[in-house]
Image: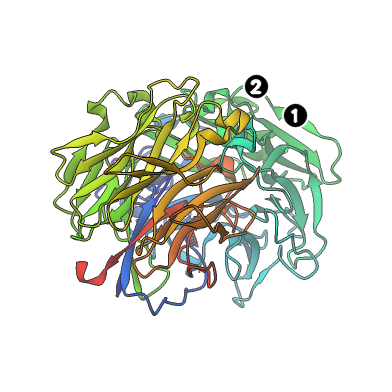
């Protein structure tokens, strides 16, 4: 057995069923612990037989969820708590829905391993739990047909992309209805399909999709596209027959996201949320969410008679007809977070606990009950065991940007488990040692650290394992405004010095933000990236690209002049691997020789490819967005880019193989030699 550890980037919710249906806030139980979270992919991956190490990577964690079911005609204080009936369902859950007859609740769970999402149903009293589909694929958003014989759901089976599938619950037959010979989307654009919903007569399935829309980021314009590299999403509403025929566009608005469609009880209208594409970024960032304003809209099946049902400030999602003239929805974020109806005031809002809140409501067909999630937040413990898509490998969780030394010590930036300091530990995730705490310096601002924009990032070991280099300062979208320094420190943290110059606030001239360094194979040089105050607006070539510093002479050489980041020397020192923004909407994995010559672009997905690292045998691992969103983007909480898969390829870019398939973002992998376990 080999081992892979990686980390989820961004914060994600981990639910546990620890409550009985008719309850509100279940008391904490032994089952409500910090469970790391991540959804994964379909077919079992072939093992990489010529690899003899195991890898670690980076994956963002979160907390626990409790399922509750409440009489929607009564105040929440009347709900009775009973945690016993759900304890056996310890798992992660995401969307959950009532069946049309009100007898079942369908949901997504991770019962077979942290990260492997499957779909289930259970009676409303917590009995008769049944798997609908369990596989290594990512399955999600399952809904039962009106007659109860069919299930529609989202799956990444066969393609790693999110498609709508239908399963016959009597025969077990399954078929893809959104990627067929007659309705296949473009393979060069986004192609995700989400949140299926049955019409009352069972003749149609409504869903949202970003099919045939271009990849794009967010934020202010720069000389090369938008400033923010995280993808946004433009969804439209479609309907299709359960056999995959008669695909039809019902609602579309250029530059907008139309999501989570649901039918009216009489089958004449469809309701959905609507927001600008830019707001699909804002709605998943807690520091920005207050500025987002979304709308609940309904439309006739012919695409006409558009009505605004709910407007005003706030992110309003999960709309659903409770009756033909009453719509329920969820107001996300802020002090008024909770469930609302258009015909009455709110009846379920935040519990008042700072890190606990309600989410994901689904109303029963008679409107008398609402099933929902109660969410708390936690971070996975270091080296938490994750679901393994390849049976030859053991997958584990670690914090961001891990690297292993020649002595077997692992270094990370403790972004999730600490305060973005540089820490090291042994191959078992123990014997943790603090090397460098940026909060004790004048190089970072506490608020920037809390929002993950600053800290000590991207550590790299010297060949002898005695030294580390890393960047200290402000990064990402703030890198053009504030300083970043390359720092060298001894392994035990007893000594450190600054290798580059910068300023707290960047002005004109040669003031640069410098960071994301990597030692050369002989330990004599360090490569790093630079960014200046005029880079984004004007593309000033003297303020961008990769540079090389000689540690003895302190001579600096400019290697590239592109929008480049995350450089790292190959194990033999002949190549530098890095990420480059190659056009206004796309980042690719590239290599150059150590002198800056012979640029080669190794990826070409059209999406973002980044965070590339070397495996010890010279193969390359990286994170890709090429398979697109696995879920509606605005429904994520507290995250940056909410998805990506880890892949591996040969030095020349051939033999690309996915290693994960998650609804979350998996990135920053590291293989650890077998003798470490």
**Location of residue 261 (image quadrant):** top right
| Residues at circles 2 and 1 in contact by the CB criterion of under 8 Å | no
- Percent position of residue 288, x then y: 52, 27
Q: Is residue 284 left or right of residue 344?
A: left
Residue at 54% in and 42% down = 561
In which quadrant of the rendered image does the C terminus lie? bottom left
Quick one: 81 or 488, which is closer to the camera?
488
At horizontal 47% and vertical 24% (from top left) the residue drawn is 481
Marker disc for residue 308: 1
Which of the numbered marks, if any, corresponds to residue 312?
2
Looking at the picture, how far across and down is residue 285, in whole percent?
50, 33
Q: Which residue is painted at 19% across and 59% down in the image?
A: 428
Q: Quadrant of residue 321?
A: top right
Residue 301 horizontal side relative to residue 156, left or right: right
Q: Is residue 205 visible?
A: yes
Q: Which mark is residue 536?
A: none
Name the colouring of the figure. rainbow
Q: Residues within 10 Å of mark 2 (few under 14, many from 20)?
A: few
Q: Residues within 10 Å of mark 1 (few under 14, many from 20)?
A: few
In the rendered view, tell whether residue 253 sits above or below residue 169.
above
Residue 612 place in picture, x, y as percent: 45, 56
On the rendered structure, is 493 left or right of 77?
left
Q: Is residue 4 visible?
A: no
Q: Is residue 330 above or below residue 389?
A: above
Q: Nearer the viewer, residue 478 or 380?
A: 478
State the residue in front, 294 or 569: 569
> Marks 2/1: CA distance?
11 Å
Relative height, residue 188 to residue 488 (above, below) = below
Secondary element at image label 1: strand
Secondary structure of the residue carrying numbered label 2: loop
- Front-lying residue, 600 or 620: 600
Query: Residue 613 location in percent, x, y?
Result: 41, 57
């Amino acid at each position: 057995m080999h081992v892979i550890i990686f980390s989820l980037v961004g914060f994600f919710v981990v639910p546990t069923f620890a409550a009985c249906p008719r309850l509100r806030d279940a008391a904490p139980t032994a089952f409500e612990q910090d469970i790391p979270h991540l959804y994964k992919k379909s077919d079992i991956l072939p093992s990489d037989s010529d690899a003899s190490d195991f890898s670690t990577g980076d994956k963002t964690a979160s907390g626990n969820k409790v399922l509750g079911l409440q009489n929607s005609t009564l105040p929440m204080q009347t709900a009775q708590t009973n945690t016993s009936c759900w304890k056996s369902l310890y798992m992660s859950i995401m969307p959950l829905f009532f069946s049309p007859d009100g007898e079942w609740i369908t949901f997504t769970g991770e019962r077979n391993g942290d990260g492997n999402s499957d779909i289930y149903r259970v009676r409303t009293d917590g009995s008769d739990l049944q798997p609908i589909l369990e596989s290594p694929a990512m399955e999600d958003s399952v809904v039962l047909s009106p007659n109860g014989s069919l299930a529609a759901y989202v799956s990444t089976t066969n393609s790693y992309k999110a498609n709508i599938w239908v399963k016959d619950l009597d025969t077990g037959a399954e078929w893809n209805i959104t990627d067929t010979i007659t309705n296949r989307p473009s393979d060069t654009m986004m192609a995700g399909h989400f949140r299926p919903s049955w019409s009352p007569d069972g003749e149609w399935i409504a869903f949202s999709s970003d099919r045939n829309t271009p990849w794009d980021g967010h934020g202010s314009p720069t000389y090369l596209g938008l400033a923010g590299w995280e993808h946004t999403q433009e969804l439209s509403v479609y309907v299709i027959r359960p056999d995959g025929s008669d695909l039809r566009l019902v609602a579309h608005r250029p530059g907008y996201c139309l999501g989570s469609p649901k039918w009216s009880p009489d089958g004449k209208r469809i309701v959905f949320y609507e927001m600008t594409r830019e707001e699909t970024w804002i709605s998943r960032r807690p520091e920005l969410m207050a500025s987002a304003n979304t709308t609940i809209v309904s439309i006739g099946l012919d695409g006409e008679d558009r009505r605004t049902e709910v407007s005003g400030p706030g992110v309003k999602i999960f709309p659903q007809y409770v009756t033909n003239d009453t719509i329920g929805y969820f107001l996300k974020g802020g002090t008024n977070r909770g469930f609302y109806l258009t015909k009455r005031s709110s009846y379920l809002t935040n519990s008042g606990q700072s890190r606990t809140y309600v989410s994901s409501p689904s109303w029963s067909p008679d409107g008398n009950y609402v099933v929902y999630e109660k969410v708390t937040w936690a971070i996975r413990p270091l080296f938490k065991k994750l679901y393994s898509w390849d049976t030859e490998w053991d997958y584990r969780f670690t914090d961001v940007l891990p690297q292993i030394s020649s002595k077997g010590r692992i270094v990370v930036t403790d972004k999730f488990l600490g305060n973005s300091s540089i820490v090291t530990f042994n191959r078992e995730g123990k014997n943790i040692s603090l090397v460098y705490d940026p909060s004790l310096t004048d190089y970072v601002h506490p608020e920037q650290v809390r929002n993950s924009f600053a800290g000590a990032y991207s550590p790299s070991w010297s060949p002898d394992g005695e030294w580390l280099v890393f960047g200290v300062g402000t990064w990402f979208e703030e890198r053009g405004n504030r300083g970043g320094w390359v720092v060298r420190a001894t392994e035990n943290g007893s000594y450190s010095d600054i290798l580059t110059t910068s300023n707290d606030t960047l002005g004109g001239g040669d003031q640069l933000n410098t960071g994301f360094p990597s030692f050369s194979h002989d330990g004599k040089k360090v490569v790093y990236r630079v960014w200046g105050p005029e880079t984004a607006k004007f593309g000033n070539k003297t303020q961008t690209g990769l540079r090389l510093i000689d540690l003895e002479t302190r001579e600096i050489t400019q290697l590239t002049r592109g929008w480049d980041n995350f450089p790292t020397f190959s194990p033999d020192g002949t190549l530098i691997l890095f990420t480059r923004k190659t056009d206004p909407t796309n980042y690719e994995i590239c290599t150059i020789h150590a002198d800056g010559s012979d640029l080669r672009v190794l990826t070409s997905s059209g999406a973002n490819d980044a965070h590339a690292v070397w495996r010890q045998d010279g193969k390359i691992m990286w994170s890709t967005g090429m398979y697109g969103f696995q879920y509606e983007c605005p429904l994520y909480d507290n995250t940056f880019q909410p998805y990506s898969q880890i892949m591996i390829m040969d030095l020349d870019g051939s033999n690309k193989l996915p290693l994960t398939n998650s609804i979350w973002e998996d990135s920053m992998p590291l293989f650890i030699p077998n003798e470490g376990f």
